[in-house]
Image: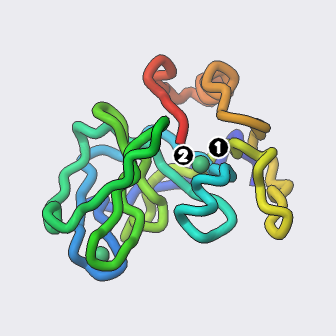
Amino acid sequence: MASDDAEGDVTPAEPLTGGCMCGSVRWELSEPPIGAGICHCTRCVRRTGTASSYSALALKANLEVVSGEDSLGFYAPDEGWHKYFCGECGSAVNPGQPELVGMRMGGFDGDPGVRPRFHQFTNYAPVWAPVPDDGLIRFPERVDYAALAEQIQREGGEVPTDRLPGS
Ligand SMILES: [Zn+2]
Ligand SMILES: [Zn+2]
């Protein structure tokens, strides 16, 4: 599973829909996400209750919450993005900021059309879940978007690197 052709045969589901565990919150993306990564930070570990967080990055303008918007709650940490969740079942939904949303990849009904290209905050991976040796680019702290963009551009992709925040 080389990272340089990870998305070669990937076809996004159509339409790109998803939602929470209980089905209250449903959303649709009009365009596929622009990229994805795996975060091992303590915040993601706590928030998900699991080893890491698989997130696809999408433009907020392309996201429509088609049902359950009233059920959405969020936690606003001192720094970083608001963490949205379904108030009925607690599923993480779409942490985001004004222009971008980090879509939980587990929330997609079908293939999101992107694959993780990097690991970030690998220094903080739980001892019980070491970062796998899967060939993806690793960042001990927050993803270095310049380095990542270089790799993505080599693969013919395009990323708005000046607007990409962290988790
Ligand atoms: Zn729910
Ligand atoms: Zn994180």
Q: Is residue 160 above or below residue 85?
A: above
Q: Is residue 153 above or below residue 121?
A: above
Element carrying mark 2: strand
Element carrying mark 1: loop
Q: Which residue is mark 2?
A: 36
Residue 141 sits in quarter: top right
Q: Quadrant for the N terminus, please.
A: bottom right
Q: Residue at x 27, y 51 (%)?
A: 29
The disc, 1 or 2, on the residue closer to the chain's N-terminal end is 2
Report whether residue 152 is seen: yes
Identity of the amino acid at label 1? Arg
Residue 134 in the image, given as x and y percentages of width and height = 80, 54
Q: Does 155 sit left or right of 75 as displayed?
A: right
Q: Does 109 sit left or right of 26 as displayed?
A: right
Residue 14 in the image, given as x and y percentages of width and height = 29, 60
Image quarter where ligand 1 lies: bottom left
Identity of the amino acid at label 2? Ala
Label 1–label 2 contact, CB within 8 A? yes
The single residue placed furthest to the front in the displayed view is 78
Residue 56 in the image, given as x and y percentages of width and height = 48, 49
Q: CA distance from mark 1 to mark 2?
A: 6 Å
Q: Does 93 sit left or right of 154 as displayed?
A: left
Q: Residue at x 63, y 51 (%)?
A: 38
Q: Which residue is mark 1?
A: 117
Q: Out of 76 and 160, give the one closest to the viewer.
A: 76
